[in-house]
Amino acid sequence: MAAEKRYPVPPETADHALLSREAYERMYRRSLEAPDAFWAEQAEAFLTWFETWDRVSDNDLTKGQIRWFEGGKLNVSYNCLDRHLDTHGDRNAIIWEGDEPGVTRHITYRELHADVCRLANVLKSRGVSRGDRVSIYMPMIPEAVVAMLACTRIGAVHSIVFGGFSPHALRDRIVDADCRTVITADQGLRSGKPVPLKENVDKAIDGLDAVHSVITVRHTGNPVSWNDARDIDYGKALAAASDECAPEAMDAEDPLFILYTSGSTGKPKGVLHTTGGYLLQAAMTFKYVFDYHDGEVYWCTADVGWITGHSYIVYGPLANGATSLVFEGVPTYPDAGRFWQIIDDHQVNIFYTAPTAIRSLMGQGEELVKKHSRQSLRVLGTVGEPINPEAWEWYYRVVGDERCRIVDTWWQTETGAIMISALPGAIDLKPGSATLPFFGVEPQLVDNEGNVLEGATEGNLCLTQAWPSMMRTIHGDHERFMNTYLTTYPGKYFTGDGARRDEEGYYWITGRVDDVLNVSGHRMGTAEIESALVLHDAVAEAAVVGYPHDLKGQGIYCYVTLVQGTEPSDHLEKELASLVRSEIGPIAKPDVIQWAPGLPKTRSGKIMRRILRKVATNELDSLGDTSTLADPGVVDDLISQRANQ
Ligand code: ATP
Ligand code: MG
């Protein structure tokens, strides 16, 4: 393998950072040696409680019982809004940038607080109360944040469904969570094109008589169909509502939200998070991982329909009184310089995005980045998939001008908050490594029999003890919760991901365990082979899966998307094979290379390898659920290409 690069913390960064290496180590040790004392201190420091808890933790992973701060009373919207009003009520809570350049709104903490109270009162007037589930199906507009916080104000449980999902997917989720109220908008906008949200809601709830209220924000203002008995105009209702609404005192263990995972590996799971522990860890990780300093502008490009949007657009930043940028559009509209333009326009200090966006913008060349200043940037984050070292270097060198720290944050919908990540002032960086665990997180690598592997090694990634923002169950299916996460290696939480640990204890996520290949007895992550393939100038993207192979056990099947204007050839195929050989070793040499015009991706931009495995093994009648794919047509292309090869 290529020599490992290392980017030490520059002394001037260390001087200004919230946490030094020494502080990180001290706090980390304490978080494992005296977890209850540690988390009690953090809960006091980060949150405002109406009543203190009876007991810090009461966990038993063998039973799937996870409880934090039980008996403690708090309200999430109070923590995200009310308590900031005296000190910085006039600070922007949200800077909104619309799909169309130049369309912006600034919303202060005071204004956001007033709208949240108004919507909370509207919800109450429709009979929504503590514990009721509310479905949110919205574009990326400030009203989506208002909707989330209004639910928390009255103790209702939100279930956000990504606005790109079909009526069918929305219906499944409304039924699964038994939502009786839906909050939506007339339409969304993406690269200038309208997205028919209200129309989709109407289709989704057709015949679902339990849904009694649909609250619709007028966003584009285009006409939509209307049913007076059920439909409520958001703007009109808020104008008539009081801007005072006392926050409901919730128990720390009351449900806060249900969120369906993005569906890369099968039927989506309704992940349930509760109130106190979730908010604490979202707030704490936000502050330390992004090294947030009071008054900075922070931008996470995720959608509120994903966990990243929950924890790091809304709850983490607002609990800290930060300014959070909300962007409605896409990275390539009107051109692929949009991100960098927005960063300059709003003087963004901290920027958090996904490898899929980085890879696609990388393909557009440096010019579009370099023509914007980006001088305000200080910290750059990534999340969602393993980031190939090549994309990491581009992010560091081109976007960050070798000045910004990169935080590669590993976590899941299920973990609620970041689990493994660098800290800007404390941890030296290695491209492609998520680096070291956050406080309270004890990763463990085990083999398939559950034996604990020590030292520098590779295996299945588990977490040994419960943490405050851990999911509590799968909504309505505790058994599935146990079977998916807790019974594979009893007493531990199994992440489903594989990882390598180096001599310094750094973690390198190798992808989902299902994606780890065993070729002639050698274990290797598909991510590693993909990283080698994309080193070639002609390759835009690559996805690797295993397939049964008579001699080797598993063979290596590579799907390769070429950069525009490049044609496939036998010569190129040979070059790619020898590139993988020289980067990783002869054992990793591809058995099959299939040219792929596009790859099947989830709506959150992740490659769905489950489907690629089926195509590789020609099991076309068992492709499984494809409803969460961004573009199902890609699969047909792959199948016909395969036939032609
Ligand atoms: P499903 O659980 O339905 O299959 P999903 O796992 O894609 O969907 P998420 O919870 O959004 O849903 O994604 C978490 C997964 O994303 C992790 O388990 C891991 O595989 C991957 N991931 C997230 N961040 C990183 C990262 N920084 N490095 C490597 N992998 C990451
Ligand atoms: Mg997952």
Image (cartoon, helix red, strand yellow):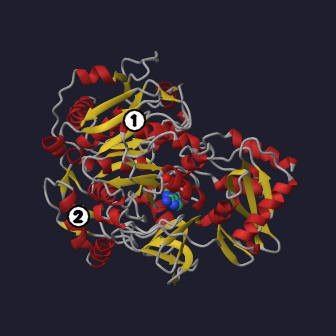
Q: Nearer the viewer, mark 2 or mark 1?
A: 1
- Residue designated by label 2: 42
Kindly identify the amino acid type of the residue bearing the numbered disc 2.
Gln
Q: Is residue 324 left or right of residue 52?
A: right
Q: Nearer the viewer, residue 238 or 9?
A: 9
Between the residue at mark 2 and the residue at mark 1, the CA separation in whole angstroms equals 35 Å
- The residue sitting at 24% across, 56% down in the picture is 252
For residue 60, above or below residue 260: below
- The residue sitting at 40% across, 49% down in the picture is 377
Image location of residue 398, percent across then percent down: 53, 51
Res 239 seen here: yes
Q: Is residue 203 left or right of residue 1?
A: left
Q: Nearer the viewer, residue 432 or 272?
A: 432
Q: Dot 1 surroundings within 10 Å: few (below 14), some, or many (20 or more)?
A: few
Q: Nearer the viewer, residue 491 or 603?
A: 603
Q: The N terminus appears in which quarter of the rendering?
A: bottom right
Residue 591 quadrant:
bottom right
Image location of residue 107, percent across then percent down: 28, 33
